[in-house]
Image: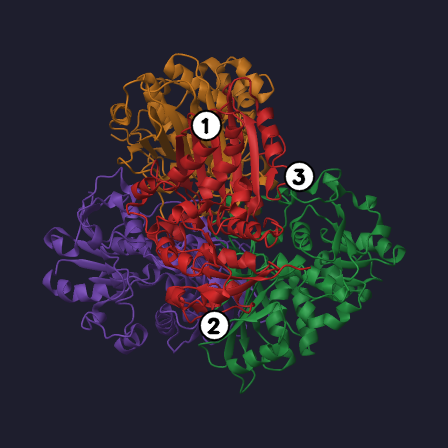
Chain colours: A orange, B purple, C green, D red
């Protein structure tokens, strides 16, 4: 028998992660689009913001306050950081039938003090923080399956945890002096109009940004520390790339004694056996972000470093898909016990 | 009851149209991938050429001669111009159960002399030319449904016919002095290594090419003449754009007396009513190629020209999808009487 | 003897045309940079806005009101449309030693009513409008040489007039139904933060915009009418390209009886003989915008149309250089009787 | 008195470094272009390969054998790796008045065995190897001034040595476990037609390449070892960027005890004081490759790492300018005792 369809709301459908979620959800057989919110564009069709949806019959954009929550089963929060927590402080308790998948950073950090340090304000729903399950699908499936509130991981943390967590858990690499040089497409910065993200400012050039100050750092360190069962500090340097989608994490790590790249690959193979969204590159082949463009795939590769005792790891994802909305949909599939590939079977768009 | 699955072969899977066809076919519920050919890469997995297919279980690449034709139902020919005709001269008669969809230009021109003029060589399967049905899906559905050999239209001809044919048929625009300024992404030039298509030669600049000499010109004129029931000559100027996918035709036409843009829009609405892959932009909105990226959609728009008695028409498609492999798959759906949207429900990938 | 150095002010140095002017002026042997204004960044170094100027010793940014006009000889106004006229209404009469080159549209339209129609407000310095010389360098050199106020042409009008004006003057092409399909890089839209100009909204796609409504239309028609000595109306459709710099005008024109492309080329050769910034492509070669990138060159080409009695013309420029700041500097050279190539000898940056 | 003009030959003017050298040399007051070679295009104008040179009066392309060496003073070798050495084996001894600046890798490695290991063939001019001066302009000025044969550094080695060499010399950073994550534009791969460098293969994505195998590695280690006066091994991972020009080296280093970022900055300031082509970013500002586009500038920055005792260094250059032809011209200026900025005063082209 076919599962019961579930009705979803996408809060913040005017942004890139909202649109990406809608793109994927439209191919999902068990999902009905119940509500799309966009405060400033309320009353308009979503196609007025994203014309690619013109051929589809979709509900008109509404304000968050106008959503008929009783008709909704699951809520994707694609809102700016800080706004989800205020909303959920009320919604979570009032509509107890609702499940939430939050794509913002609001519920990713477990320690309220660390949250306050990095976001400069106290959390508005501290009682919900312990309820939230950190939703890196492949690494937390059982917990996600039982959650009411999933904190969807950030894009950088996803690309960094997928290769590192199994190796730290297995004790194959050192936890000290992990060097992360990460590269992201511009869509990760969202759709808001900023001079720094104009076409002419971004094309045909690149630069590091937020050196030592990026807000994904505490999320990365929190999760790697949990995996390693000890405090992990990393060096994390993001770079802005002249491309819209795509993310690559280049990881420079020290191997534990008597460990070689072969052991790393075996560990990944064992850990990710049967995972539909994780692929290992053949030996000697480096991953390219374009091969996972608009797909939920992650590509992993490991190389021996020229420097003895060290290895170089790579992970390529699409920052909007596996790094945001694709993983969110994957988490919904886990929540409802559906086939995890539903709505996510798109092949990478290349060329 | 579910239709019987059909097994396809993709000849020329090492090129962009072959890969695009495979990307789409993998989401089609009634298609089995029976064979993928690539002469120089025979014996390798398709993922060695296009790593985006690594997660999929696909047949190994073979040479065309190695295909077990008895196990194949339909053949997509994604081969270079000139090679399909030689192959089909034999295959068509020997394996009469096979259906063919040819994405090359080999069977698009009905007049062998015009073929010879533009391609500089005589046709190698002149007896098959009359068998071929010119497969612009929306405009030739009944003929395609009965064909054994479909000549899939070129990308420029598709983007040009979709807006013009209904208007010429309805006598709303003049057939004289139609000015076509067309813009294409580089993937239309294929994957072969040419200096002119190197990244550094293409990025951040543009230029016209093949002015008055592009091989799509006779195809355009043949089809517009059939629609207008008189000989049509056009001015056709393609331009190479610094982008991989996407095509825009900007059409500058003279209106017949007493015709306004409103009549053009009504004609399109009537002609394309219910068509899943044709959308009209709302009045005043111009189409953007990025909104049909990696989708089979075509976006049409009409504007009154500043010059009285004239109109400006636009059509945006993805040159690899509706302009090639998407339309080929649409034609397969027509051939088998399937829902035309199967395998083609992807939303445009934007951003 | 070496000419006396002149001191310039660049008003609006925080924008792209201001920065481009500064880039060129720094290589000019007779120019001293006297003042750079940027209201919101006053007090900062220009390198805080455009780090490429860090190695240069330049005056700090000031507000327009802070400029010591007595120390300035010539003023480049790179301000937004509407602001120059208000400023010059006072400045022009008060500091009569100053020469002005205005890169905005404020003084390009001779007819105040047409100005009001297109800009929705009455002109704030109507007495200065008759003083302004429309500064397309190659076409108005004697007038520019004597001007105190030069209205620097728009980028589209430059790319359109250079090929058309000599042909209209010589009566070689018809003035009716000139079809202009123009393509521009995004830098033409300036540096202000707008969603539509974000990298992710622009890359890898294209679209027409302002169809029939672009503010360069009246400027084009005014100037072509002057050249043809009769009222000229054109069809003008700009398209936004996924590139930062570069502009191509594709012009579809009808030839006068007994005129061929050969006559067009001869007319250009005669008209532009010895011009350092105008090059004709060899027969059969189409111009590429990338070959004039960051240079003041214009590339012209003419092709016979497939349609008898018609021709296709192309003009490629860099919208920021010959289309704006390069031409402004060329006009300064004319104003002071200097070699016109001073500060403008840069070869196109390709690749 | 004005210095005597010198006549140069550019061997390999059909490639990107040849064209870049010509672009710069055309603005040099003391250089005459004596010969441009391109074997396959001999007899044609350079503008047939690079139309940006059409406005210039330049010698026709000839074959290397056709150069009248007696009329030449200095030779820029922009030939593929392996061909310069064979040519110079004869030319160097026969025409003793000639000075050579070789942009290939042929004379960069001092140890013939290391050369053979990395290039798979024995060197064809081993007697000249000791004559060659490794020409990183800022670091070897006195030796370059006296050289007859300058081995112009590779692009990656330039971007890596500029920040590291002063710090290694001063003993401020450890020589062990230097991690280099480098990013390059595609023009570094040259103009030869390769599938991997096609626009559609490169745009909107990125990937590491040559991991642990890049031929610039021995050059980097040779030079850093000389600076540190001990054997240095590094971890070096290049990444291909979706851009034509530009290079960024991100360097992750360990500080010597009691050293902070302040000391690094002071060391650079002392070392590069008065250098016209080296700029330090203000504290907290990261360099962007676009700000040095088409200029000979290098931008350096240092940040404290989150990890105690470590620092993150960046160096941005244009791979074709400071990374190749710009530095070659700078070396010519040194050879002739000219002002080092001659021909190199171009401001970075941004936007």
What residue lies at 50% left-to-right and 27% top-to-bottom?
A: A104
Q: Is residue B105 left or right of residue D22?
A: left
In the displayed structure, does residue B314 sit left or right of residue D26?
Answer: left
Q: How many marks?
A: 3
Residue B147 appears in the picture as rendered:
no
Tell me whether the residue at label 1 lies in contact with that at label 3, contact meaning CB atoms closer than 8 angstroms: no
C236 left or right of B247 in image: right
Q: In whole angstroms, how far apart are the C-alphas of marks 1 and 3?
A: 31 Å
| Residue B46: percent from left, percent from top | 24, 45
Q: The N terminus of chain A appears in which quarter of the rendering?
A: top left
Mark 1 surroundings within 10 Å by alpha-carbon count, few (fewer than 14), some (14 through 19), many (20 or more): many
Residue at which label 2 appears: B178
Of tags 1 and 3, the one toward the viewer is: 3
Find numbered disc 2 in the image and state the secondary structure of the residue it sits on.
strand
Instruction: Look at discs 3 and 2 and give the one toward the viewer.
Output: 3
Question: Looking at the picture, how far across and down is residue B10, in whole percent?
Answer: 22, 53
Residue A282 visible to an observer of this rendering: yes
Numbered disc 3: what chain? C
Chain containing mark 2: B
Q: Are marks 3 and 2 on the same chain?
A: no
Q: Residue at label 3?
A: C48
Which residue carries the number 1 mark? A154
- Which percent across, then down, holds residue A351? 36, 49
Q: Position of residue D312 (x, y in %)?
A: 51, 28
Chain to which mark 1 belongs: A
């Amino acid at each position: 028998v076919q599962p019961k369809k579930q009705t979803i709301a996408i809060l913040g459908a005017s942004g890139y992660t909202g649109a990406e979620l809608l793109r994927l959800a439209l191919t999902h057989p068990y999902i009905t689009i119940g509500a799309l919110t966009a405060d400033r564009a309320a009353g308009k069709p979503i196609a007025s913001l994203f014309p690619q949806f013109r051929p589809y019959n979709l509900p008109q954009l509404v304000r968050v306050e106008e959503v008929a929550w009783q008709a909704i089963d699951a809520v994707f929060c694609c809102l700016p950081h800080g706004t989800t927590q205020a909303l959920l402080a009320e919604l979570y308790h009032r509509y107890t039938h609702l499940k939430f998948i939050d794509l913002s950073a609001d519920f990713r950090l477990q320690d309220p003090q660390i949250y306050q340090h990095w976001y400069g304000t106290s959390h508005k729903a501290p009682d919900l923080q312990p309820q939230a399950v950190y939703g890196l699908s492949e690494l937390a499936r059982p917990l996600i399956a039982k959650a009411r509130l999933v904190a969807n991981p950030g894009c950088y943390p996803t690309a960094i945890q997928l290769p590192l967590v199994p190796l730290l858990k297995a004790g194959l690499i050192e936890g000290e002096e992990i060097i992360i040089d990460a590269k992201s497409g511009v869509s990760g910065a969202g759709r808001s109009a900023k001079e720094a993200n104009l076409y002419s400012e971004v094309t045909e050039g690149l630069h590091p940004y937020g050196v030592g100050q990026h807000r994904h750092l505490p999320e990365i360190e929190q999760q790697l520390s949990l995996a390693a069962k000890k405090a992990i500090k990393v060096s994390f340097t993001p770079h802005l790339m002249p491309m819209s989608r795509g993310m690559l994490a280049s990881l420079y790590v020290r191997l534990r004694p008597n460990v070689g790249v072969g052991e790393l690959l075996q560990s990944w193979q064992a850990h990710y056996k049967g995972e539909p969204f994780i692929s290992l590159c053949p030996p000697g082949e480096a991953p390219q972000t374009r091969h996972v463009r608009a797909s939920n795939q992650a590509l992993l590769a490991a190389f021996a470093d020229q420097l003895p005792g060290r290895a170089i790891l790579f992970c390529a994802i699409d920052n909007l898909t596996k790094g945001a909305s694709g993983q969110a949909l994957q988490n919904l599939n886990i929540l409802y016990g559906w086939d995890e590939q539903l709505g996510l079977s798109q092949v990478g768009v290349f060329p």
